[in-house]
Image: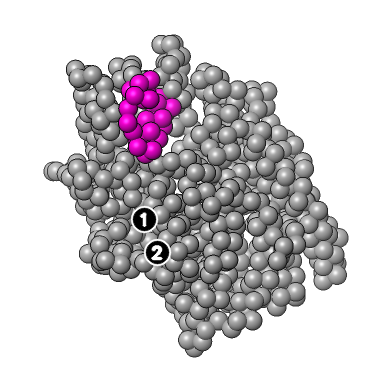
Amino acid sequence: MSNPLLTPFDKAPFEQIHNEHFKPAFLQAIENARQEIDQIANNPEPPTFENTLVALDYSGRQLDRISSLFFNLNSAETNEEIQKIAQEVSPLLSEFSNDITLNEGLFKRIKSVYENRSALELSEEQKTLLKKRYKSFSRNGANLNEAGKNRLREIDKELAQLKLKFGENVLAETNKYEMLLTKEEQLKGLPEGAKEAAAQLAKSKEKEGWLVTLDYPSYIPFMKYAENRDLRKELSLAFGSKGFHGDDLDNQENVLKIVNLRHERANLLGYNTHAHFVLEERMAETPQKVLDFLNELLEKAKPAAKREFNELEAFAKEMDGINQLEKWDSAYYSEKLKQKLFNLDDEKLKPYFKLENVIDGVFKVAEKLFDLKFKEVFDIEKYHEEVKTFEVYDRNDRLISLFYADFHPRPGKRGGAWMTSYKPQYTLNGENSRPHISNVCNFTKPTSSKPSLLTFNEVTTLFHEFGHALHGMLANTNYPSLSGTSVYWDFVELPSQIMENWCYEKEALELFAYHYETGELIPMELVQKIKESATFQEGMATVRQLSFGFLDMAWHGKDPSGISDVKSYETKAFENTSLFPETTETCMSTAFSHIFQGGYSSGYYSYKWAEVLDADAFAYFKEEGIFNKEVADKFKEHVLSKGGTENPMTLYKRFRGEEPKIEPLLERAGLIQSSD
């Protein structure tokens, strides 16, 4: 039988692929890529930019496509078999990656071109490619001796497996927990939609009653609205203790192994810590700069956070006689206080945000800003029937991208929301090969009586992920490794976070926020309240976000070899940012997938860093008009289309005319008074 993954394809052949195709495809593609690498390394011609750097950048494309397809399935539609294959192929991929960076003949050729770079007439993009590739070799051990190279291989292989295991444990913990409620009074306070979803979930598992789980669409409404404090506590502790039960799904040992191996790896390569290693390739540059940045924001946000916490505690006491506000009270009383102050209930907003209308809205915003048109198509293969597929065209009806959208939770899908790419954009032999981009989210499913209605938070999530998608779709570079979202990690969130700003603007909401039953446009006083409430408890939210950044730096910015107790170390890292009483049963680190499974180690600060960029960039749009073509064209030209072809600060200054300032973020968050 022929293997669809080994037959050349443009669009991913999802419906022809079976699990048994993956491993043979990986083995064959690794072998093919290895031959391509050997050809480059053993080329008898003297090394040039073209025959070495360019050849290397276009090598292994078959393997890259199979990898992106497989690992997205492992996140969006996994099962035990796929997870097992992931455990088997991850070390092979890690080993192959090391074989490339530790290939002496290849590195010799790259080094020769790099050392002769001043004599070459290279464009900015070519200079970036050369520097990035040389650094990727030296930062991955190319200058090490044989013993060092061997140890590096061992570390990378072990890390690849540990990260996967960490993620599998978190997913298994999420899927394992169920809170079955059998009395209707236990659901008191829950909106009808949440009750109906809980009943439907119970029914789907052939159980009587209502089922609440740790999936966000189930967990968040319960924490926000359920009056039963004991049940909120039970659910909150279950959510906060994933990977922290001392059983076979426990992640404490995995955390310690991961941070120690990362530290050893950094030392091996001549860096003080893992954070020093990572930040060399970031806008922030050093751990000290990151800590200064986090502390500057903490200084501004902490007084507001304490004030907000005291206000919330007083409100809970007045309302229900609560003397000590606990973590499981936060969402519940915050929602009640928000309703009291703004009379703004998420449930009142949801009818205006039917999923299909919001998708249409984000498409219209993209059309007005960047001249894009989206056409839903039904002849593209997909990995699950819920996935929607679109072709994206520019104003001249040229195909810009394919777009896959997958919006609802399933047992085989990890939590959260992300953007991924099945095929990058690049230009080869004069042909601009267009990208295939995907957004994956976990939004409330439609029920038998209601369509999928989004909370306002889910609306901003959809816009956020779509911002990443635009960064991928509008890519217009030569080399695949510099295309789309292949940028510095603390720059990658700018296109996503800036898109969230349109959700608060009347002109944008008028494009899509219509009541799903009456067709009535969202009342502008509700829009005004959304804007006013955007700074509600922003001090607490900022401190919470900063706390994750501090925790990340605590794990990766110091020598971790003396740490034996994950929980007590985490508690110490949270010392300056904690507002709520400590709970001994919970641990954030054992489920902190962003830094222990995803790519955010020593990078969690970048969310806030990008907020500074996005607030400053959106201030420019506000000055000129939120749909101003000139500003949008500049953003498209200098940010969205350029990928990682130049230093991000250079690109940003080209768009904005100057470096970003921190004040627009502080003003937007209500932490300082507006200078207007």
What main secondary structure does the magenta stretch of the protein show?
helix
Foreground pick, 118 / 448: 118
Residue drawn at point x = 36 percent, y = 67 percent:
371
Query: Residue 587 placed where, x, y %?
Result: 66, 43
Residue drawn at point x = 53 percent, y = 37 percent:
282
Residue drawn at point x = 68 percent, y = 69 percent:
533
Three-letter amino acid code at the position of disc 1: Leu
Tell whether 57 sits left or right of 212.
left
Query: Residue 277 placed where, x, y %?
Result: 54, 28
Q: Give the residues drawn in magenta, as a range.
A: 113-137
Q: Which mark is residue 474?
A: 1
For label 2, the residue is 370
> Alpha-carbon neighbours of circle 1 within 10 Å: few (<14), some, or many (≥20)?
many
Q: Secondary structure at mark 1?
A: loop
In the picture, residue 319 is in which quadrant? bottom right
Foreground pick, 675 / 343: 675
In the picture, residue 314 is in which quadrant? bottom right
Tell whether 528 sits left or right of 85.
right
> Alpha-carbon neighbours of circle 2 within 10 Å: few (<14), some, or many (≥20)?
some
